[in-house]
Amino acid sequence: MGNPEARADLREGAWQAAHARSLAEPEAFWGEAAAAIDWHKPWTRVLDDSNPPFYRWFAGAELNTCYNAVDRHVAGGRGEQPAIIHDSPVTGSVTSITYAELQGRVARLAGALRELGVDKGDRVIVYMPMVPEAAIAMLACARIGAVHSVVFGGFSARELATRIDDAKPKVIVAGSCGIEPNRVVPYKPLLDDAIAQAAHKPERCVIFQREQLPADLIPGRDLDWAQIAAAAEPADCVPVAATDPLYILYTSGTTGQPKGVVRDNGGHAVAMTWSMRHVYGVEPGEVFWSASDVGWVVGHSYIVYAPLLHGCTTVLYEGKPVGTPDAGAFWRVIEQHKVAVLFTAPTAFRAIKRDDPHAEHLGRYDTSTLRALFLAGERCDPNTLDWAGEILGVPVVDHWWQTETGWAIAANCLGLEQLPIKSGSPTKPVPGYDVQVLGDDGLPVAAGSIGRIMIKLPLPPGCLPTLWGNDERYRASYLSAEPGFYLSGDAGFLDDDGYVFVMSRIDDIINVAGHRLSTGGMEAVLASHPDVAECAVIGVADPLKGELPLGLVVIKCDVDRAEAEIAAELVAKVREEIGPVAAFKSVLVVPRLPKTRSGKILRGTMKHIAEGTDYRMPATIDDPAILEEIQGTLAAAGYGASD
Ligand code: COA
Ligand code: AMP
């Protein structure tokens, strides 16, 4: 173990004790955890439960998240420690930014934003590739109390426009381009297109020019990041209420309209910091690497905020697990930067295993600094978990969480006590989370029985207090299924030992390479094609990406065009309107879609057929012959062969 001192408090029963206390005495538990944060003003209540089902943590307190993530580490002697290591195989560069440098760069951008009129509570959209400037922009917003909303680079202009209209940013900070292994992605035309599509117009755009593809700036609207930051007066940290929003992060809902998950400042800072030590078992000064993207919640929490709040060095990796240049990329980064803990999605390990099944690249590197691998973002298949454990020889922890919670709901908390690993389970509920599995009658189901996984309110600090500007949607989407519970949207079970098993979603969300996507959103795009009469999109199991979307479309009877031509247009349309990240590449034209007698399309049954898994003929089916027809079409296209 790399840091025995850090692990001296590990003891048997620690998880049980911490979990029980967090539920029995949440105010005492989180009040103590909050001592790890510097507050401008203490709270009046640790948990404000005066307005259920809305709960607020650390009401009355004031702090600044950027101060806690950057300035106090400089003041505390970490100024010369690397804060961010940008490792970018796609540009062939590795750069390191110390905490002291980070403080200066964040303060100058914060000053520049303020000079543009950005004030406390104003929104700033950040549309950036995996460069340190993405984290700098986020922290600069936090520094002046502005609310950032980062949009993932793999989304289309239309998705960006939707977020612009919901968040109504005063300013957008964007990179000129992103770099994928096979192409340079020009961000600026996407940004211009999004602003043209949006009803809300930002006052200014700040463009970070990358040498790989500098962008043309629109006079009067666009400003060059480097120029304005150089000219700006550095801004100091502004105290904000613990309950003020730090950021909005949009995530797929069941409709095409994404949900704006709100994160507060106080609860978030406490939960992030607590999780670094107790979930991940990491100490300040160590190197933490989350191989994700700042556009996702994993990137927000574990590339940017948690490692920095905890005084770690974070690795910001602009590359892929394979192909940049090979399946040894992860091992090279671990060796080069002495990574203590790696966090990524199972799909990354499936990609490595596919390219290097015997992990031969691993032999070229010294990965002895690595103490643990954490996986999340999608269900982790036991094969991948076992393979990763075998080749690395460290604990592999599957942990379960979602954009809404911002940190793990269930995990093997290595910083408390390493519980036995059960493949297929993200272990036990993390302290703070009262996880229950309820049946349709609203009562807990027996151990081993599948039901809706719910969390008893209040959610712990760090979880969403609401959706941006939409308390009603928050209530309707998450809190109305059962009074007093948060609906996770996942189905699964608890076993006899209290281990959580997350099996599937109960809505139309699918998980493609660890990316959360709405099939409803894709259906809306297909349905808007003039030749499409009706359609369904289902997620079909894929050995690399976990799931891949498959479109089944019925063409209008008066259309006389080649099916392949229409299918190609539909693929292009989803890429154009949602983005390449949807990985929507397969469309089958079918004569009819199977439905229930009340007209509901039997997506679940078609998924079973496409995956070659057992299914029962739904009792409510309108016409069983249609299902046979679909089976034939899917089989002809190569679907349904079970392995
Ligand atoms: N900007 C622009 N385009 C992007 C992008 C970005 N930030 N991220 C992905 N894309 C594009 C890809 O280039 C690809 O385009 P293509 O259709 O032209 O090939 C498409 O979106 C799909 O991307 P992805 O699903 O990531 O597939 P991939 O083939 O590029 O890579 C993996 C597959 C498994 C290697 C990759 O998904 C991966 O590294 N996953 C790690 C897990 C992860 O990051 N999870 C996030 C949550 S933890
Ligand atoms: P996101 O909001 O993008 O993080 O996606 C969250 C969803 O991904 C969850 O609701 C689950 O459906 C799925 N998910 C994340 N982690 C896991 C895991 N460890 N096991 C099973 N499903 C997971």
Image (cartoon, helix red, strand yellow):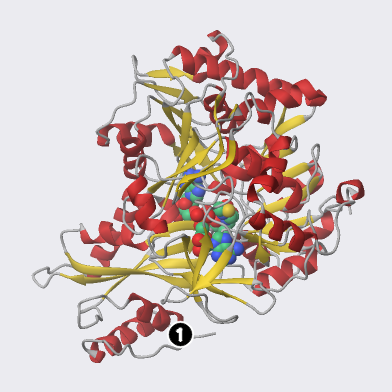
Quadrant location of the C terminus in the rendered image? bottom right
Residue 327: image x %, image y %? 69, 57
Percent across and percent down for residue 268 are 59, 41
How many marks overall?
Answer: 1
Disc 1, SS? loop
* Residue drawn at (59%, 33%) of the image: 44
Residue 21 falls in image quadrant: bottom right
Residue at 74% over, 56% down? 18
Q: Which residue is mark 1?
A: 612
| 329 sits to left or right of 340 | left
Mark 1 belongs to which amino acid?
Gly
Left or right: 539 as drawn, with respect to 33: left
Left or right, 528 with reference to 519: left
Decide which of 5, 389 is in the foreground and name it.
5
**Is 242 drawn above or below residue 49 in the view shown?**
above
Q: Nearer the viewer, residue 594 or 425?
A: 425
Q: Give x and y (percent) for residue 579.
A: 39, 50
Q: Crowding at label 1, few (<14), some or many (≥20) Cα neighbours within 10 Å? A: some
200 relative to 591, above or below: above
Residue 378 visible from this viewpoint = no
Residue 34 drawn at (x, y percent):
68, 38
Q: Quadrant of residue 362?
A: bottom right
Q: Is residue 639 left or right of residue 622?
A: right
Q: Residue at x 36, y 63 (%)?
A: 519
